Amino acid sequence: MTYDAVPLIPRDVLFGNPERVLPTLSPDGSRLGFVAPDEGVLNVWVGPADDPAAARPVTHDRHRGVRTFMFCHDDRTLVYLQDTDGDEDWRLYALDLESGAAELVTPQDKVTAYIVEHNRWHPTSILIGLNADNPQLHDLYRLDLATRELTKVAENPGYAGWLVDSDQRVRGGVAMTEEGGAVVYRRGDDGDDEPWFEIGPDDVLTTDVAGFSRDGSAAYLLSSVGVNAARLIRVDLATGAETVLAEDPEYDAGGVAQHPETLEPQAVTFIKERKSWTFLDPAFGAEVGGLIQRLHGEVGISRPVRDDRTWLVHDVLSDGPVRYYRYDRDSGGLTFLFSHRPELEQYDLAEMEPFSYTARDGLTVHGYLTFPRGVERAGLPAVLDVHGGPWARDTWGYNPEAQWFANRGYVCVQVNFRGSTGYGKAFGNAGNKEWGRAMHTDLLDAVEHLAGQGLIDRDRVGIYGGSYGGYAALAGAAFTPDVFRCAVDIVGPSNLLTLLASVPEYWKPQIALMHNRVGNPETERDMLWDRSPLSKVDQITIPLLVAQGKNDPRVKIAEAEQIVAALQEKGLDHEYLLFEDEGHGLARPENRERFYAAAERFLATHLGGRVQPD
């Protein structure tokens, strides 16, 4: 197969609404719910568990869509969250599945709700966090599903997060320290909270309370204290005795699979190049291992049904759509439900390939490459697609942007630069206060590594990303314009001083973490300005495409307008796309089409790739 013979994958296949996604079974096993388009807008659909084709929409949004929902254990209520035009002021709705009536249960303006706890033992009760009284702190409320009454049960004394057990008892909370660490508080029988243990700044992103045992006698911690990478630990709350359940010297423990009745951990996953399982329960391990052998990619398990006899299984490949199955544990039957984008099946997608290299200071950095199909791997144009966060990471699996870049003729380069999560605290902390410095040179070293191998053309590399990735794109244009031919910034900060001064109110209890890892405006103002792309706008010589959501609460519109105004004033080549009804990213398909069409033309103009005909 030659490159010219590779069919062009339409943008709407890659970036339009999925056909069906996020399936879940109701706790009694009778219903299947999922998110799918209804009149072109994503909504929640519900139908019989054994017949996805019989599902009908139960939400009826006609604007931004509904993407987050949950069946409740009363077996008749579905709750979902929705914001307005990307403002992230999430409101909670409760929908009666028998009557179809939906009710807004958190109607306050400029308040964001999140679900803290709901389970089988309290089927008509949900604990909710609401910052209605203090915009910086989420108090704890109980929603009665039978009456829809909302009652405050605990006022927040300063916690960034609550600790709650399966009996919906408050067990304590986590408060940030001025040094960028945290103190975990434990609530005694008298109702008073006392310090339980302290997490230093170096461990704060790799240590957390993962939950409690069903009887409340033990806590499960993910903790890197005393070691490099987060391990799963069981703590006896009466004696303080600790038992290490799972660990890896280099990679942080991630997902924990718990028995749905006892809440005992049965498996832990570590995200290395690919997902790696450590099984604590041999029988569970044998069953999951059997599913892994029967499927083709990385297998995920969801266990929403109370009797635990039916699982939802998803199979993730890097070169095909995500496929969802229903697994009957009694019969061993594995029934295919649907894939999230069946149209992809008609195209030959590219495989995502892990790679690693040594950065200039000796640190090993990992990432992923996706090459165009049907073309010799030599001297290819490339797009460095930088992940957001930055305290996140790229993972192996289906990625629409990676497929888009490869299909248009570019090598997609994804780098888990220092500061990315999952690789242990030493690697994560190596990114502290290295925005625009070592975090950026890791990206430059990736380009040099791949160009040195002859895989990419050093003179045809673009840099692209959203959020922190947008910052990295702006930094590439402002700090190292000789490395990149062009840059695409999606909701990226241009000025670190204004970014830190304008974080959402409910982020402010954690601002010390930002100061510790990005910089403190009170003591490091000059450094932060020097690391801001806006400060070096005179050095920009490459074309820029800037995209921004007007209602973004994290990276305010001023971040885009500052850099765009400077580009205009200096007559520098740029394009600016402002989306009036979006926030931190693009949710509406018509906006995604507008952006990706513009980005595709922009990249083709400057890097020479293919363009979908209008």
Image (cartoon, helix red, strand yellow):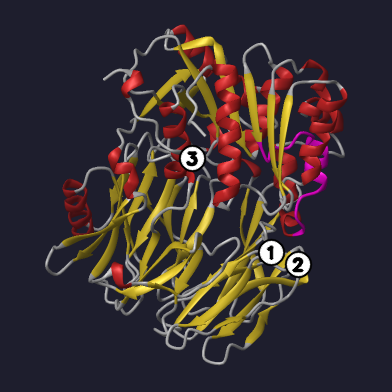
- In the rendered image, which quarter is residue 356 located in? top left
| Label 1 crowd bin: few (<14), some (14–19), many (20+), radius 10 Å | some
Q: Amino acid at mark 1?
A: Asp
Q: Which residue is mark 1?
A: 89
* x and y percentages locating residue 236 in the rendered image: 44, 65
Labels 1 & 2 near each other (Cβ < 8 A) = yes
Q: Nearer the viewer, mark 3 or mark 2?
A: 2
- In the rendered image, which quarter is residue 111 located in? bottom right
Magenta range = 490-505
The residue lying at 83 percent from left, 18 percent from top is 538
Q: SS for tag 3?
A: loop
Q: Nearer the viewer, residue 526 or 159?
A: 526
Compared to 206, does 611 lie above or below? above
Q: Which residue is mark 2?
A: 110
* x and y percentages locating residue 73 in the rendered image: 41, 81
Q: Nearer the viewer, mark 3 or mark 1?
A: 1
* x and y percentages locating residue 118 in the rendered image: 48, 75
Q: Which residue is mark 3?
A: 227
Q: Nearer the viewer, residue 498 or 549?
A: 549
Spatial CA span between label 3 and label 2: 41 Å
Earlier-in-chain disc, 3 versus 2: 2
Earlier-in-chain disc, 3 versus 1: 1
